[in-house]
DNA sequence: TCGTCCATGTCAATAGTTTGACACATCTCG
DNA sequence: CGAGATGTGTCAAACTATTGACATGGACGA
């Protein structure tokens, strides 16, 4: 009763691709859930967190790290500025860039957000021992680099 | 000169989270690049591929598997229908569902798309031997399940 | 020095997605 | 049998993000 196998099966590599998407989607959803009570979207959190790690960074660089266009990052920053979470330098910098930094208010909020996100991430890797975690990290780095290096 | 470590460092689990996002973003971008010449977006490809694996599936179920709302899946399907890639049953089914199937034209197109995507996925795992691939898959499954089981 | 090139910031238009709401059909349980 | 719960399809509005375009301000090389 089997159909003739004209349709090729899904390769292991493809299954890995959908698995990565599934995992990322689940992680994103859980993060959105725990960040919602704080009034933050995942993109906003990533923005604040990156800004905390690299203060005074430019908007375009921020956009690259968060994987959005610099235009959407701009509107995102406008929203955060209105809420008093960030401050942008008025004086245009070396090129034309406006240095962006977190306000004390944002630093406090970020602490709560970080705790919530860390809990989600911890739950994700709860069943993994440290060795397995390192192994997973190394394998993912290999996949990411293989994807980003090849195109040029 | 060290600042007091009020700001907690990023935990290994969190680094894993951003790594998953980076890998998924890179994969998505590469897929978009190779699918663009075929006139397909990544979402459209995922839709056709899922429909190929499970013919006659309902739109809502399709939306769940592709991780979009059933409303956006609806407009997505409308676009595919106009291009003659899918056909939706007029007769409302058991509940109110309209069975959706691929047209022969879509099957041909999907073959090219599958080949292109398989190449990208293969490049991603090129540096991994089969054993490492299986290990990565098992670890990702553990992470995904830990995220989807806990909330309920 | 000057012209070309690159990068940032921003505006406008467009496309894609989500949220909220409603009608309809089925299932389930009292 | 009947009322509520559940699931599907669809419309409208709001939101988010992308693409395209432009001005501005350095950087680099002839």
Image (cartoon, coloured by chain):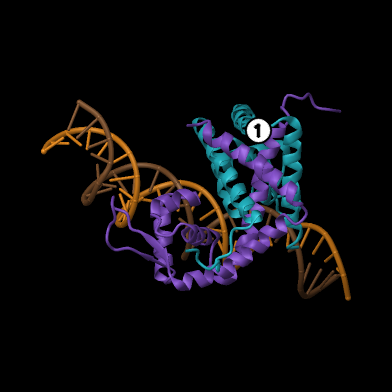
Chain colours: A purple, B cyan, C orange, D brown
Which residue shows up at 58% across the image and 67% down it? A113
Where residue A77 sits, quadrant-wise, is: bottom left
Decide which of A67, B54 is in the foreground and name it.
A67
Residue B61: percent from left, percent from top: 70, 50
Quadrant, the N terminus of chain A:
top right
Which residue shows up at 71% across the image and 43% down it? A135
Query: In the picture shown, does residue A149 fall above or below A42?
Result: above
Could you tell whether A63 is left or right of B144 in the image? left
Decide which of B118, C23 is in the foreground and name it.
B118
Which residue is the extreme one toward the front? B1
Query: In the picture shown, does residue A138 fall above or below A37?
Result: above
Residue pointed to by mark 1: B125
Residue C6: percent from left, percent from top: 33, 39
Secondary structure at badge 1 equals loop
Decide which of B17, D1 is in the foreground and name it.
B17
Q: Is residue A134 something one can see in this rendering?
A: yes
Which residue shows up at 45% across the image and 72% down it? A104
Chain of the residue where label 1 is placed in the rendered structure? B
Marks counted in the figure total 1
Q: Is residue B84 something one can see in this rendering?
A: no
Which residue shows up at 76% across the image and 37% down it? B134
Residue B96: percent from left, percent from top: 71, 54
Within-10-Å neighbours for mark 1: few <14, some 14–19, many 20+: many
């Amino acid at each position: 009763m089997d159909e003739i196998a004209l349709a090729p099966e899904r390769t292991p590599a493809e299954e890995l691709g959908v698995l990565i998407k599934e995992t990322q989607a689940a992680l994103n959803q859980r993060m959105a859930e725990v960040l919602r009570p704080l009034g933050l979207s995942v993109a906003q959190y990533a923005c604040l967190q990156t800004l905390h790690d690299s203060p005074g960074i430019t908007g375009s660089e921020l956009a690259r790290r968060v994987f959005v266009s610099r235009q959407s990052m701009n509107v995102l920053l406008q929203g955060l500025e209105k809420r008093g979470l960030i401050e942008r330098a008025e004086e245009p910098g070396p090129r034309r860039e406006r240095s962006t930094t977190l306000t004390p208010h944002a630093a406090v909020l970020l602490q709560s957000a970080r705790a919530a996100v860390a809990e989600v991430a911890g739950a994700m890797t709860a069943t993994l021992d440290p060795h397995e975690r390192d192994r997973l990290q190394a394998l993912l780095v290999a996949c990411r680099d293989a994807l980003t290096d090849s195109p040029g």
